[in-house]
Image (spheres, helix red, strand yellow):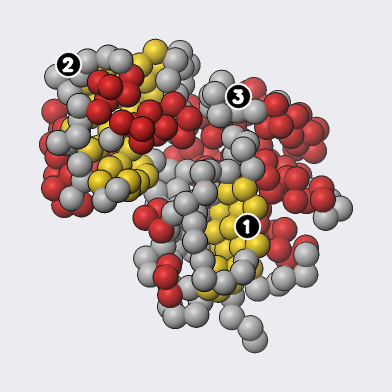
């Protein structure tokens, strides 16, 4: 029996990472590659759990690292800092993504990335290009990922392609995308039983530029004020994370999914780059950014330019 090909998204996986892993397993098998196996390299969040429960999917296996020669397929990421431990030991067969390319490999592989709002949008197009029927459960997984990454089409990362794909998927899924999407997003805003340390790692990504390491985390909520009641506790665990990881900056974006704004907490020796990036002064380590909801398109580019 041939070894399994592990399919996974990034650390601290969001709904797109988990759903795209499951979708990619289905696509691989329908293309004749029976060894694909969706796994996760982090904890499933409440938003994603809502999707899996809706579809009666119990869970997908967790892996912490990979052994020498393990064949893998990456979805929704392409940076080593966001990948499974010891990814350098693996042989990457494919990458399906929608982020900026930060990837090098000393061998040929299939690489597909597009400037769209969600990896599942790219996967939808792969089904169509290969003339493979999309079943209802796969359509719901694709829709869930698109809704999550585009905040129900409100994020500036959302493209015309995402909207058109979602319309086609809604027909196959036979659900009301607005009703389902709002319920799904609200499920992800229940933060009461998270510790402060868990909260800052619900959806967090590490980056590096010219030897400077920084991290941008994001939590979605319907009340920024409620999250800020834990401000001192959050700052304490952020400071601890900065020390443990040797970060120069940690940003936590607390994003109001109903009003499309974010309050940002920024700590670290490079925290002042936030001032230059957004033209606003940090006050008590915080700044309110009206209309800002996207890490990829609104936070990371300006931080990257100024760090």
For disc 3, the neighbor class at 10 Å (few under 14, some 14 to 19, many from 20) is many
Left or right of residue 97, residue 129 in this image: right
Specify the quadrant of the image occupied by residue 224.
Answer: top left
Labels 3 & 1 near each other (Cβ < 8 A): no
Q: Is residue 186 left or right of residue 57?
A: left
Verify CB contact (< 8 Å) between mark 2 and mark 3.
no
What residue do we see at 18% from left, 50% from top? Answer: 246
Badge 1 crowding class, 10 Å Cα cut-off, few under 14, some 14 to 19, many 20 or more, is some
Instruction: Work out which residue is located at the far right of the displayed protein and give it.
Output: 131
Report the front residue among 47 and 97. Answer: 97
Q: Nearer the viewer, residue 170 or 59?
A: 170
According to the picture, the residue beneath numbered tag 3 turns out to be 153
Report how far apart the C-alphas of labels 2 and 1 lie in the structure.
43 Å
The residue where tag 1 is placed is 111
In the displayed structure image, the side of residue 143 where residue 182 appears, left or right = left
Residue ID for mark 2: 283
Instruction: Mark 3 or mark 1: name the one nearer the start of the chain.
Output: 1
* Residue 84 at x, y percent in the picture: 41, 62
Front of the two marks 2 and 3: 2
Residue drawn at x 33%, y 28% as measured from the top left: 253
């Amino acid at each position: 029996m041939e070894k399994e090909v592990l399919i996974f998204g990034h650390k601290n996986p969001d709904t797109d990472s988990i759903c795209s892993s499951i979708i990619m397993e289905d696509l691989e098998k329908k293309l004749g590659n029976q060894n694909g196996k969706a796994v996760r390299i982090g904890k499933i969040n409440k938003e994603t759990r809502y999707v899996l429960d809706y579809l009666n999917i119990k869970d997908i296996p967790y892996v912490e690292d990979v052994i020498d020669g393990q064949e893998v397929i990456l979805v929704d990421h392409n940076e080593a800092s966001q990948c499974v431990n010891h990814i350098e030991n693996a042989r990457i067969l494919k990458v399906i993504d929608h982020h900026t390319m930060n990837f090098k490999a000393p061998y040929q592989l299939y690489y597909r990335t597009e400037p769209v709002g969600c990896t599942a949008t790219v996967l939808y197009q792969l089904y169509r290009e290969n003339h493979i029927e999309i079943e209802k459960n796969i359509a719901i997984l694709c829709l869930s990922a698109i809704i999550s990454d585009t905040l129900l089409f409100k994020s500036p990362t959302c493209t015309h392609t995402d909207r058109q794909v979602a319309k086609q998927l809604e027909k196959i899924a036979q659900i009301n995308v607005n009703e389902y999407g709002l319920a799904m997003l609200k499920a992800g805003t229940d933060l009461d039983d998270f510790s402060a340390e868990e909260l800052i790692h619900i959806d967090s990504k590490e980056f590096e530029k010219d030897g400077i390491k920084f991290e941008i985390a994001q939590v979605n909520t319907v009340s920024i004020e409620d999250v800020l009641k834990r401000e001192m506790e959050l700052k304490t665990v952020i400071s601890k994370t900065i020390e443990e990881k040797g970060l120069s900056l940690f940003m936590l974006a607390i994003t109001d999914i109903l009003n499309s704004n974010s309050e940002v907490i920024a700590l670290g020796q490079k925290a002042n780059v936030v001032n230059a990036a957004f033209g606003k002064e940090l006050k008590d380590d915080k700044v309110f950014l009206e209309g800002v909801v996207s890490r990829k398109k609104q936070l990371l580019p300006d931080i990257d330019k100024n760090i």
